[in-house]
Image (cartoon, rainbow, N blue to C red):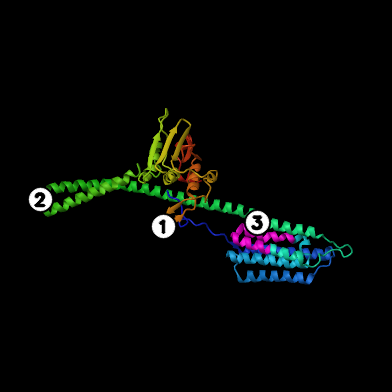
Amino acid sequence: MTEIAASDFRPAQRHIRLDTILRLRWLAVLGQLAAIFIVAQGLEFNVEIVPCVSIIALSASLNLALQTVSNPLQRLEPMQAAGLLALNIVELAGLLFFTGGLQNPFSFLFLAPVLISATALPARFTFGLGVLAVACASVLFFFHLPLPWDSDDPLVLPPIYLVGVWLSIVLAIGVTSLYSFQVTEEARKLADALAATELVLTREQHLTQLDGLAAAAAHELGTPLATIFLISRELEKTVKDPIFAADLKTLREQTQRCRDILSKITQLSSTGAPFDRMKLSELIEEVVAPHRDFGVDIKVRIAVAAFAEPVGSRNPAILYGVGNIVENAVDFAHTTVEVNAWWNKDTIELLISDDGPGIPPDILNRIGEPYLSRRRTPDDAGGERRGLGLGVFIARTLLERTGAKVSFTNRIFPEHGAVVQITWPRQRFEAIETLEETIG
């Protein structure tokens, strides 16, 4: 029940498939050819057809070469994908140079490669592509050929309007790219955190299953070991030869030792079933026990109620979730952690509090989000490793899947420390749930 560290879970890197970029580039080629054809033939404007078609032909040739040489389904490294997107920007700038610069309404297409980068590439590449797009737009502000238009009624836009177009392109690149990046990053973090949650729950399932198998094995081995112990003890009484007697004594002692070991294994689980029924007080004690030897006094208070004590499944999700919150309380407490429980016919409530510094105000409203952490955990080499901030998120997610509501507050001044309230509907808590239902 420890904080997941970077060495335990590494989110997958984001890559773009070559096929995705090639499809976009082919779409751009077709759109550019259609635009030139419509302007030149449909509107009968004077267009620099040869240089424009040459740029489009170079783009199409590169597409064909990439499709021939490379596997379209391969995932590009961020640098390669950024290079192709940068080439899109340069190609667009070349076409705009021959077709009016920023006066061309298609100048806003500078935004497209930057948005694609914002949703699929690291921030540094998006920033670089944004700078390149702004630089190209700035050059086109001063240097470009006239906009294809009716020669009898030429279109002349005032410089202040062109400044507004340039500024709108810059703002659109900055604002929309930042927004897209933030939305995509939050979605990616949430997906990675949920994947880590499933990983933790799977581990807990394996541990619980091993617990049940160990208890079942101990139960099955108990009978033959008891028989061996009894026979060796009887033989020890009847055999007079001191050599054989010594061997029989050793056999009896080792058999008893095996019985003691199996007895300890049996105590780990009351039955051989992976999901035992256990009282709320037993659940709390099982969660609290591993944290009692860390120099922090853990006080458990079970309220006396008029209703019978709740009995629920030995659910790994509940054990991990409550255990992680208790562990956090122990980590931040100065001297004391309190675990209070009460119930009635409808509700079960746990209050876990500590006398530590409490939750910082800037984190309090965001507590439980993935990758939100200010704590460091020791590694096996005695140093420190940075946690990913997934512990509380995983605990909260697992508990909410069991029907609980989890809230985080601080104690009221002058007291200090954090308080975590976990509330279940009693009917949901006492329902027999399998782990598969919890995961689903």
Circle 1 residues within 10 Å: few <14, some 14–19, many ≥20: few
Say which amino acid is labelled 2: Lys
Q: Position of residue 309 (x, y in %)?
A: 41, 32
Extreme-right residue of the structure: 152
Extreme-front residue of the structure: 414
**Residue 104 left/right relative to 378:** right
Location of mark 2 (residue): 240
Circle 3 residues within 10 Å: few <14, some 14–19, many ≥20: many
Say which amino acid is labelled 1: Gly
How far is the residue under mark 1 from the one under mark 3?
39 Å
**Residue 112 left/right relative to 317:** right
Question: Which secondary structure, mark 1?
Answer: loop
Labels 1 and 2: the sequence-earlier one: 2
How far is the residue under mark 2 from the one under mark 3?
92 Å
- Please, is residue 427 above or below residue 34 in the view? above
Location of mark 3 (residue): 177
Question: Which secondary structure, mark 3?
Answer: helix
Q: Residue at x 63, y 70 (%)?
A: 66
Where are the magenta residues, as a range?
Answer: 107-133
Q: Which mark is residue 383?
A: 1
**Dots 2 and 3: beta carbons under 8 Å?**
no
Q: Position of residue 400 (x, y in %)?
A: 50, 42
Q: Residue at x 68, y 59 (%)?
A: 112
